[in-house]
Amino acid sequence: MIVEDELIIQMVTKQVVQKAGFSICGVTATGEEAIELAKQCNPDVILMDIKLEGELDGIDTMNKIREFSDVPVIYVTGNSDSYHKKRAAETKMFGFLVKPVDFGELINTIKKCCGI
């Protein structure tokens, strides 16, 4: 599952992840939709941006998802300051990648997360 507010990054990430052989159960730009999508499709991993459209940021969104799921999360974000890293770590994140992300590193992180 991909949660990203920038349409171009959303599309490229989806294409790269699919080309690597992974399925995408859903893509959204808001935390509110991400929560519902996570409930519906029960993803194996979530690629989460921190800055999102809507009222919730990615970290708040993961805190809400944590109420019903232990799904691994890999943050893919431009918010790499210590404040955001500390907040993200509290959501039991699997990874924290800084934009512009190296797609090879992203795929390797997904593979590690999924035990591949």
Image (cartoon, rainbow, N blue to C red):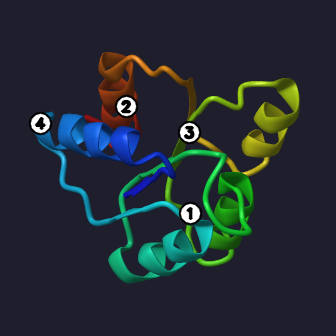
Rounded to the nearest angstrom, the CA distance separating label 4 from label 2 is 17 Å
**Few, some or many residues within 10 Å of mark 3 (<14, 14–19, 20+):** some
Residue sitting nearer the eye, 7 or 110: 7
Rounded to the nearest angstrom, the CA distance separating label 2 from label 1 is 16 Å
Badge number at residue 70: 1
Mark 3 or 4, nearer chain start: 4
Q: Amino acid at mark 4?
A: Lys
Q: Amino acid at mark 3?
A: Phe
Q: Amino acid at mark 1?
A: Asp
Residue 84 rendering spot, x and y as whole percentages: 80, 37
**Few, some or many residues within 10 Å of mark 4 (<14, 14–19, 20+):** few
Rounded to the nearest angstrom, the CA distance separating label 3 from label 2 is 9 Å
Badge number at residue 112: 2
Whether residue 112 is situated above or below residue 43 in the rendered picture: above
The answer to whether the residues at label 3 and label 2 have Cβ atoms under 8 Å apart is yes
Which residue is at 47% across, 46% downward?
Answer: 6
